Image: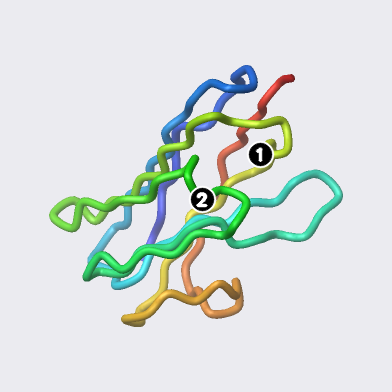
Amino acid sequence: VQLQASGGGLVQAGESLRLSCAASERIYTMGWFRQAPGKEREFVAGISWSGEIFYTDSVKGRFTISRDNAKNTVFLQMNSLKSEDTAVYYCAAANRMWIDTSESEYEYWGQGTLVTVSS
């Protein structure tokens, strides 16, 4: 499975961005991770084929993950962005029915897209 992520960019604090990730074939669970400079990669949000959703606490109420199963695509709508959201965002996917927050549980990874939020 190949993942192609897009949508990163430079925005000011409080603005919005929408990330997209297209998978080359059907995949059960898709998610987003991010890695800020000097930090480890962390889970951001995940969505299962059935629509179960899980967010890390720091993005709850600001980020929304969704998917279009017909197009094998997952989206991450990011609102009210903060400088601490600055990171490279990675799309990940796994052939399992449940969401896992551990990156080791995801078999497939996209190339990463940079999100920079200026304060």
Res. 85 mark: 1
Q: Quadrant of residue 25?
A: bottom left
Q: Quadrant of residue 83?
A: top right
**Residue plotted at (48% across, 58% down):** 45
In the image, taking residue 5 as reference, residue 85 lies left or right, namely: right
Q: Position of residue 7 (x, y in %)?
A: 45, 32
Callout 2 amino acid: Lys
> What residue sits right under mark 2 in the picture?
60
Q: Quadrant of residue 26?
A: bottom left
Q: Residues within 10 Å of mark 2 (few under 14, many from 20)?
A: few
Q: Position of residue 77 (x, y in %)?
A: 41, 38
In the image, taking residue 49 as reference, residue 91 lies left or right, namely: right
Toward the viewer: 14 or 118?
Answer: 14
In the image, taking residue 66 as reference, residue 30 lies left or right, namely: right
Q: Residues within 10 Å of mark 1 (few under 14, many from 20)?
A: many
First in sequence: mark 2 vs mark 1: 2
**Residue plotted at (39% across, 59% down):** 2
The vertical placement of 37 against 116, above or below, is below
**Residue plotted at (50% across, 55% down):** 32
Tell me whether circle 2 and circle 1 mark residues in contact (CB < 8 Å): no
Q: Position of residue 118 (x, y in %)?
A: 71, 20
Callout 1 amino acid: Asp
The vertical placement of 55 against 36, above or below, is below
Q: Position of residue 107 (x, y in %)?
A: 49, 75
Query: Which residue, as the protein is rendered here, is positioned at the far right?
Result: 38
**Element class at badge 2:** loop
Toward the viewer: 73 or 46?
Answer: 46
Q: Which quadrant does the C terminus fall into? A: top right
The vertical placement of 94 against 33, above or below, is below
Res. 105 mark: none
